[in-house]
Image: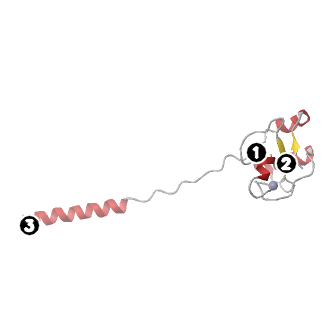
Amino acid sequence: MAHILTEDDNWFIDLDRKDPITHEGFQLGDEVIVCRACRCVQLNDVWEMGPTGCKYCGSSEASGDFDRDFIEHKVSGATINKAGPIRITHKKKKKLWPYFAAGAAALALIVLLILYFL
Ligand SMILES: [Zn+2]
């Protein structure tokens, strides 16, 4: 199932695809596998990692051969193998202004009380 990239696969190297998990380009000697569903090419190690299957679309069916036409005509356009690193969205900062407002109000009250008793 897996395919080892050789000189014959330079057309594929030239496509400059990236592995969906490592985000690294492919090199001669890499053991790769093609997803039958989305035609995404990924490292065999990535395919086998965790639940075996395509780390792009989740399909567990690999294409039997490393076919140029099949790989070049991807199913869902330019996004496959071109995706950047997964972005982690940062949690929104907690709003602090209500605490400041409460603190200021308390301070004003204390000042007023002190002035009242003087
Ligand atoms: Zn897939």
Q: Earlier in the sequence, mark 2 or mark 1?
A: 1
Numbered disc in front, either 3 or 2 = 2
How far apart in space, not on screen, are marks 1 and 3 (Cα)? 74 Å
In the image, 70: left or right of 111? right
**Type of the residue with mark 1:** Asp
Quick one: SS at disc 2? strand
Q: Where is mark 3, residue-wise? A: 117
How far apart in space, not on screen, are marks 3 and 2 (Cα)? 82 Å
Mark 1 is surrounded, within 10 Å at the Cα level, by few (under 14), some (14 to 19) or many (20 or more) other residues, namely many
How far apart in space, not on screen, are marks 2 and 1 (Cα)? 10 Å
Q: Where is mark 2, residue-wise? A: 33
> What residue appears at the point 49 percent right and 57 percent down from the top-left corner?
92
**Type of the residue with mark 2:** Ile
Residue 66 rendering spot, x and y as whole percentages: 91, 45
Q: Are the residues tagged 3 and 2 within 8 Å (C-beta)?
A: no
> What residue appears at the point 28 percent right and 61 percent down from the top-left corner?
103
Q: Where is mark 1, residue-wise? A: 19
Colouring method of the image? secondary structure
In the image, 88: left or right of 25? left
Residue 74 rendering spot, x and y as whole percentages: 84, 50
In the image, 94: left or right of 39? left
Number of marks: 3
* Mark 3 CB lies closer than 8 A to ligand 1: no
Rendered view: 108 above or below 17: below
